[in-house]
Image: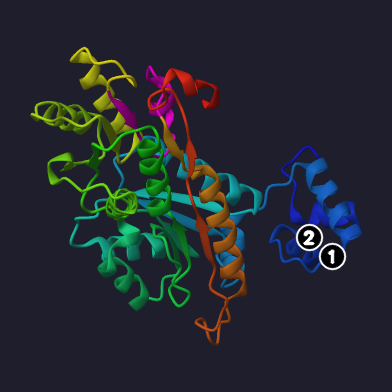
Amino acid sequence: MLKNKATIKDVAELAGVSIKTVSRVTNREGSVKPDTLERVNQAIEQLNYQPNTAARNLAGRKSYALGYVYDNPNAYYVLDMQNGILAECRDRGYELVIHPCSATNKGIIDELATMVKRSQLAGLIISPPLSEMPDVLTGLDKLNIPYIRVISGSEVQVNSSPCVYINDRDAAFEITEHLIEQGHTKIAFLRGDECHRSSHERKIGYLQALEKHGIQSDHRYQIDGSYSFEFGVSGAKQLLQLEDPPTSIFSCNDEIAAGALFAVRLEGLDVPSQISIAGFEDSPFSRQTWPKLTTAAQPTNVIARKATASFIQYLSSRKDDDPHNDLVPHLQFKPELVLRESTLNQARNENVN
């Protein structure tokens, strides 16, 4: 039995159950008794049985493959998303098709529709900025292509499509308030790409914290740019050339913050005693700099796994006769403040994580 690749029939015989029961177990249908489930899983492990996704897709209307669609310049974010989705897919017996694309492509809907049809996908997992583009979502809805999207948002809209909300606004508020508590009133903000909703949400949080503490917003301290190291360098240089430069810089992500840190140290300024710098996302950039960056930890890998698990459960519960009459999943995450040396005075270093 072990000489050739194990089949579902081999698993059924070893576990002493029907082929249909094995199918229920591999499909995570949840209708199998615990002792039977344990026997089948032991047989699967003993035989090293791997479900044939293509055969499962052909056997019925249900597909066991998902697509991850993205257009994002942040390599760390994309990698964490891919790893999280892939890990959950493997655990649940699904295949994953990874599809990078251009959000500015006028034919993006046709491109995605072709991919879904060609790969026989059950649905799509979409991350920013595509997940935040109304035209893309409307196009997918018209084609009845299921999807779950990851977006930046502080409020859950219960009537929307399956969605994972990242509360960037409140996290940005906490970072800004931390800088204020450190004695800063001249706080600059380096914003990321216009097409990313996170750029707007994080700026709103920054402005709300200033308003709460009675600090006048200064447009000279607010520079729009992109999620890149290069923008961090150029943005910080622009700020330092002001007659009255800021004493702290809140960057829209860690890559921008790392660039800002590089620029201010080239000018001979000490961080944090002369100028403080904070980032966002807790990417490797935040831990590879010196000093390490205060940031907001965004567990992208965990977010990706939970989004995938929720989406698969949603797809399994969809009714063929009324695909809109389902419990639509909505998840929310808030990045957590991580205090590090780039914003903390020596007297407070005992609080550094």
Look at the image and say whether residue 284 sits in the magenta stretch: yes
- Decide which of 13, 95 is in the foreground and name it: 95
| Helix, strand or loop for disc 2 | helix
Q: Range of the magenta residues? A: 275-293
Residue 184, x across and y down, in percent: 31, 34
Count of numbered tags: 2
Q: Residue at x 20, y 51 (%)?
A: 194
**Which residue in the structure is indicated by mark 2?**
22
Quarter the N terminus occupies: top right
In the foreground, 261 or 53: 261
Q: Give the Cα distance between marks 2 and 1.
A: 7 Å
Instruction: Give the residue type that dot 2 points to.
Output: Val
Q: Which mark is residue 208?
A: none
Q: Read off the residue under disc 1.
A: 18
Give yes or no for residue 232 being in the magenta stretch: no
Which residue is the extreme one toward the bottom? 321
Residue 207 or 199: which is nearer the viewer? 207
Local crowd size for mark 2, using a 10 Å CA cut-off: few (<14), some (14–19), many (≥20): many
Residue lying at 29% horizontally and 50% vertically, measured from the top left: 214
Residue 106: percent from the left, percent from the top?
A: 18, 62
Residue 10, x across and y down, in percent: 81, 52
